[in-house]
Amino acid sequence: MALNSSSYYSSRSCSISTQFRKNPANPHSVSPRSAYFGLTSSSSSMNSDDTSKPSLSVSADSSSAPKARFVARRTESVSVRPLERPLLEYMSLPASQYSVLDAQRIERIDDKTFRCYVYKFKFFAFEVCPVLLVRVEEQPNGCSINLLSCKLEGSPIVVAQNNKFEASMVNQISCDTNNQSNSSLQKLTSDTVIEVSIEIPFPFQAIPIGTIESSGTQVLEQILKIMLPRFMAQLVKDYEAWASGDTSRQPLGNGGI
């Protein structure tokens, strides 16, 4: 299976705004079924020590500076035609058998932890490139992908915010298990929620907080709008390859959108 960005269902959940696939033949291969992920929180550089932290959000030192809050949520569903090997079996693979769908964007840290390089985007003319550390938790019908930490790269003013924000992200991926025997199609769903709270840098404090929050929320929504459909398409292709007995588990992505 794969990682992705997301959330909450009656079906099997599995979350990832990142992209990872399960690889029963090669547990450490890199291929995506990954959640698609969202933006995350936090500060200093990430290393293997971060993987032991169970919290889903990371906070930085607070100050008297005003803060802005961005929240975005998106649900993406696709119809999947079941093959000889059931979709539910694919969704039930342990995280240790995931492989990333895009080797240029995802790297495995351990059996359940992945580092994800989000696409660069502009915010008020400044370049932002989040690097996320996420952890996958298996659930009955899928998985949940949770943010452990986030490091911001890009313009100098962006990098300077690494100690001045907190963020959380949950991406739940689920498989609809209702009436499997009576339907030729099943639904695969990714539900992602991202929340970011950041101190407003001094050069922006003259701008109304509402304007900053509206712009930030629009940026997060646009990221999810672009990435989730791509992730879900890759997830379906990965399932089809797995169901056909393909043991190569080659990454389907090439780093592009």
Image (cartoon, grey):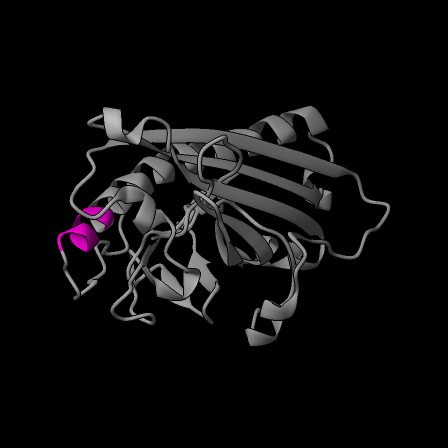
Q: Is residue 71 left or right of residue 240?
A: right
**How far across and down, in percent of the image, does residue 170 sit?**
55, 44
Residue 257 in sight in this render: no
**How far across and down, in percent of the image, does residue 22 sit?**
32, 58
Between 25 and 125, the one lying in front of the other is 25
**How far across and down, in percent of the image, does residue 30 sit?**
30, 66
Q: Does 156 appear above or below 79? A: below
> Which residue is drawn at the image coordinates 55% and 36% (left, top)?
193
Q: Does 226 appear above or below 202? A: above
Q: Is residue 81 left or right of residue 165?
A: left
Whether 79 is among the magenta residues is no
Whether 243 is among the magenta residues is yes
**Rendering quarter of residue 248:** bottom left
**How far across and down, in percent of the image, does residue 118 sit?**
43, 52
> Which residue is drawn at the image coordinates 49% and 40% (left, top)?
6
Residue 160 in sight in this render: yes
Magenta residues: mostly which secondary structure? helix
> Which residue is drawn at the image coordinates 49% and 44% (left, top)?
38
Q: Is residue 165 left or right of residue 74?
A: right
Q: Does 108 appear above or below 89? A: below
* The magenta segment: 239-244
Residue furthest toward the right? 64
Between 42 and 154, the one lying in front of the other is 42
Q: Is residue 213 left or right of residue 233?
A: right
Between 14 and 222, the one lying in front of the other is 14
